[in-house]
Image (cartoon, helix red, strand yellow):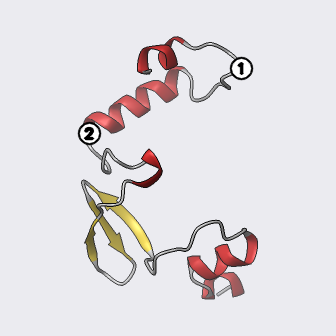
Amino acid sequence: MHAKEKLNAAEREAAVTIPVYSQLALDPVRAAGCDIFTRDGRQILDLYGGHAVAALGYSHPRLLRAIEEQTRRLLFQSNAVALEIRAEAA
């Protein structure tokens, strides 16, 4: 096992990032619906939705389909360029 594999994600992140926010003592490995599943087997109802990035839950089939369809068309473009999809979403 490599040395970095012995460290958990929080320890690895702390070694290479600037601590902007304090972190919860969780080690999530996957998520579905409104639940997060941790490495130690806990299932936790995720009520956070912080920073407006996860308020739609996880792995909903319609959300996944919409993301897949959009990534096949255009994954990202700076707001220095006008985009129809961004105007529509706004």
Q: Secondary structure at mark 2?
A: helix
Q: Cα distance, mark 2 to mark 1?
A: 31 Å
Viewer-proximal residue among 4 and 46: 46
Give the left or right position of residue 7, taking residue 85 as reference.
right
Viewer-proximal residue among 21 and 1: 21
Disc 2 residue type?
Answer: Pro
Give the left or right position of residue 44, taking residue 76 as reference.
left
Residue 55 image offset from top left, x and y in percent = 34, 47
Mark 2 burial class by Cα count in 10 Å: few <14, some 14-19, many 20+: few
Picture residue at 64% right of the left edge, 87% below the top: 1
Residue 47 image offset from top left, x and y in percent = 29, 61
Residue placed under numbered mark 1 in the picture: 80
Q: Is residue 67 above or below residue 34?
A: above
Q: Based on the displayed image, in which of its 4 quarters is residue 80 positioned?
A: top right
Q: Is residue 75 above or below residue 37?
A: above
Picture residue at 57% right of the left edge, 14% below the top: 83
Disc 1 residue type?
Answer: Ala
Q: Secondary structure at mark 1?
A: loop
Picture residue at 35% right of the left edge, 60% below the top: 48
Residue placed under numbered mark 2 in the picture: 61
